Image: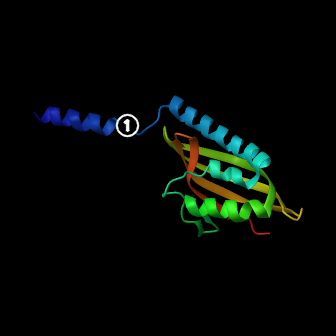
Amino acid sequence: MKYIWLLIFFFSCNSNNSSLSSKDADDVKDSVSRMTEHIVSDLSVKGPIAWLDYFEDNPGFFMAVEGGLAFKDYQSANRYIRDTLVKTFRQISLQWDHLRIDPLTPNLASIGAGFHEEIIDSSGRKLSQGGYFSALAEKTFRGWQFRNVHWSMLKP
């Protein structure tokens, strides 16, 4: 009887259902990488409203900037982007640098990357900023979207 318990213990410790096969991990990396490419192209075509396609529309979404909470949920992000940001910025050109995607499960991935943005504001003035971006992405019925986001800006 004690050998049965040892076998159960051994197999329960060695069967990690949350781990990904290397093929599954590669699939997650590829699909999340495609999402980041789509973000770049959508921002250049649609402007800041494109972010709403990539923010997960659920109460758990949040976004922090420089260590402070910028959006407590999707509704606050949606309101700010629609009411303010689209009127402030005409065009955004985003570039990712050293993109890192860490697959956590088939439906979750951690993302980190340097970024650089060239922004044209409503008066035609060009603004440049860069820093580091990190997020948790989740595969939803709409594709990969961000559950949470953090932006850190480089100091000029």
**Residue of label 1:** 17
Q: Is residue 31 above or below residue 80?
A: above
Residue sitting at 73 percent across and 49 percent down?
Answer: 97
Residue sitting at 53 percent across and 41 percent down?
Answer: 139
Of the pair 119 and 19, the residue shown nearer to us? 119
- Mark 1: few/some/many CA within 10 Å (<14, 14-19, 20+): few
Splitting the image into 4 quarters, where does residue 85 fall? bottom right
Query: Could you tell me which quadrant the N terminus lies in?
Result: top left
**Residue 130 appears in the picture as rendered:** no
| Residue 80 on image: x %, y % | 66, 64
| Residue 23 on image: x %, y % | 53, 29
Furthest-top residue in this view: 23
Residue sitting at 54 percent across and 61 percent down?
Answer: 73
Q: Is residue 10 left or right of residue 47?
A: left
In the rendered view, how is the structure colored? Answer: rainbow
Furthest-left residue in this view: 1
**Residue 75 appears in the picture as rendered:** yes
Of the pair 34 and 71, the residue shown nearer to us? 71
Residue sitting at 61 percent across and 36 percent down?
Answer: 31
Furthest-front residue in this view: 83
| Residue 37 on image: x %, y % | 71, 41
Number of labels in the image equals 1
Q: Is residue 44 left or right of residue 106?
A: right
